[in-house]
């Protein structure tokens, strides 16, 4: 029997997921692949940089024999086992267990793995649909480059397009840092841009900035017409969140610099992406497309700079008079800058916050943050989300988000902060109402 007072029976709409997304060249993998992904930081911190880079390059290129022999030489299988053991006390481990049990019943790890892979291979959408049904989720927004609307009906799976691929038409400066996360994001951005150029019938990068901006606008128009409901900025993984309004002349100069050299000049790289970001955000204002922005920490592997993913760096963008009606949603709770998000939303009526990602990484923190957000901010600012492509994680994150929200609402009612009616209303606002208003969609 459910113990939820306010969130039970309230349908959810997931503000940020990756439902339907399988990275290019990646094959379907069982639920244990998430533990493996989470083990990368443990491995990276224990084998020499060059060896790690080589092992990941072989793995990502699908050269299994080379990857396996290198892994054996570096004792990577033992490191993975060790990481698995240490991961077992994390919220993530609990979530994988809870979600698997809900979808496949209680089994040993091997059987769960087999069942999770079989279910994906047989009918991935049916499996995701089941996770939605069991968690009373009406639909999800999904951050995905393209979606097959036949396979993943728009009614339940609404795509959101990243703007980042458009920001870096000349690629990126050479990566010499730790980890493989940032270079992976860069590769994905570049391949998505190439795909959008192909779809537009543009054989190669346009020669001028002006022609390029025309292509970007047309590409966004086409995606909007095909059912994309919003935009996302994931640039924190590859650059600073400090987007500066840039004069057209400076952008033209940066374009010429980047076009004339093989090495990507870091200053020109930033100038051009700053300029393009504002162009696209003005398009978003004109087309009433909400924009999600990644803030705060990244994956458990080095790459993203936490200091440049600080949401306060967005103050120039948020404070821009031409963007005052842009519907902004700062996503993932911005950890460890969560209270900065609270302040930004309190001071800017067009800024909203989602706590996607948090329900499967953090437990007590989610409750504390919801308390802070819901008691200070107007009721229209907070949105629930999962940030996952996994049906198992979707189910467990949604159930955990419901529970955390319920606990906060119960305590608010107990303390005389809200009436029971107000608590019920807040549950609806957070679980779907705010999203429906922002994106103009209905349950
Ligand atoms: Zn995400």
Image (tube, grey):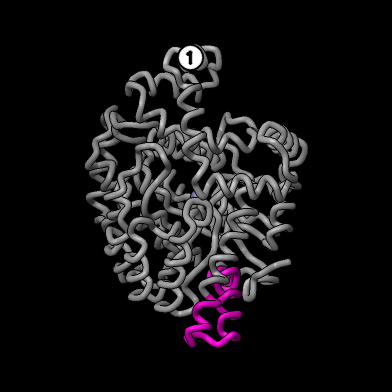
**Magenta stretch contains residue 83:** no
| Mark 1 Cα shell of 10 Å, populated few (<14), some (14-19), many (≥20) | few
**Magenta stretch contains residue 436:** yes
Instruction: Work out whether residue 382 or residue 247 is closer to the camera in this orientation and state it.
Output: 382
Q: Residue at x 52, y 83 (%)?
A: 414
State the quadrant of the N terminus.
bottom right
Regarding residue 170, the answer to whether it shows in the image is no
Is 280 placed above or below 318 here? above
Is 145 placed above or below 381 here? above
Q: Residue at x 37, y 69 (%)?
A: 342
Horizontally, residue 273 falls left or right of residue 10, namely left
Quadrant of res 132:
bottom right
* Residue designated by label 1: 72
The x and y percentages for residue 248 are 27, 54
The x and y percentages for residue 22 are 60, 38
Q: Residues in magenta?
A: 409-438
Is 296 placed above or below 42 here? below
State the quadrant of the C terminus.
bottom right
The x and y percentages for residue 358 are 48, 56
Instruction: Work out whether residue 224 or residue 148 is closer to the camera in this orientation and state it.
Output: 148
Q: How many marks?
A: 1
The x and y percentages for residue 143 are 54, 50
Q: Residue at x 23, y 51 (%)?
A: 249
Q: Main secondary structure of the magenta part?
A: helix
Q: Secondary structure at mark 1?
A: helix
Instruction: Work out whether residue 88 or residue 293 is closer to the camera in this orientation and state it.
Output: 88
Quadrant of res 49:
top left
Regarding residue 127, the answer to whether it shows in the image is yes
Is 14 placed above or below 307 here? below
């Amino acid at each position: 029997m459910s113990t939820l007072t306010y969130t039970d029976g309230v349908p959810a709409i997931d503000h940020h997921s990756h439902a339907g997304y399988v990275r290019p060249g990646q094959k379907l993998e069982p639920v244990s692949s998430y533990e493996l992904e989470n083990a990368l930081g443990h491995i990276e911190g224990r084998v020499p940089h060059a060896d790690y880079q080589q092992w990941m390059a072989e793995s990502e290129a699908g050269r299994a024999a080379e990857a396996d022999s290198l892994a054996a030489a570096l004792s990577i299988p033992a490191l993975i086992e060790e990481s698995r053991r240490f991961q077992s006390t994390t919220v993530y481990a609990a979530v994988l267990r809870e979600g698997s049990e809900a979808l496949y019943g209680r089994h040993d790890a091997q059987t769960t793995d087999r069942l999770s892979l079989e279910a994906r291979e047989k009918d991935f959408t049916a499996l995701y649909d089941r996770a939605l049904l069991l968690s009373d989720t009406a639909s999800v927004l999904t951050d995905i480059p393209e979606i097959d609307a036949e396979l993943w009906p728009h009614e339940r799976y609404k795509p959101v397009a990243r703007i980042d691929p458009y920001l870096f038409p000349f690629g990126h400066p050479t990566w010499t840092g730790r980890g493989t996360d940032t270079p992976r994001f860069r590769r994905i951005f570049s391949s998505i841009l190439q795909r959008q150029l192909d779809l537009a019938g543009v054989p190669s990068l346009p020669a001028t900035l002006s022609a390029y901006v025309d292509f970007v606008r047309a590409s966004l128009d086409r995606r909007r017409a095909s059912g994309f409901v919003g935009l996302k900025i994931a640039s924190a993984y590859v650059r600073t969140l400090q987007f500066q309004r840039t004069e057209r002349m400076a952008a033209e100069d940066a374009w010429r610099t980047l076009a004339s050299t093989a090495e990507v000049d870091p200053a020109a790289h930033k100038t051009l992406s700053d300029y393009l970001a504002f162009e696209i955000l003005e398009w978003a204002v004109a087309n009433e497309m909400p924009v999600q922005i990644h803030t705060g920490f990244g994956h458990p592997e080095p790459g993203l700079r936490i200091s440049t993913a600080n949401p306060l760096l967005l103050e120039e963008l948020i404070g821009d008079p031409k963007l005052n009606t842009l519907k902004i949603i700062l996503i993932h709770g911005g950890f460890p800058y969560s209270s900065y998000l609270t302040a930004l939303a309190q001071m800017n009526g067009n800024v909203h916050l989602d706590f996607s990602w948090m329900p499967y990484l953090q437990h007590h923190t989610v409750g504390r943050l919801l308390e802070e957000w819901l008691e200070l901010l107007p009721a229209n600012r907070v949105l629930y989300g999962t940030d996952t492509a996994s049906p198992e994680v979707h189910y467990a994150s949604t159930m955990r988000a419901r529970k955390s929200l319920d606990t906060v609402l119960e305590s608010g009612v107990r303390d005389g902060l809200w009436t029971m009616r107000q608590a019920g209303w807040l549950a609806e606002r957070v679980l779907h109402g705010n999203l429906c208003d922002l994106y103009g969609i209905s349950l």
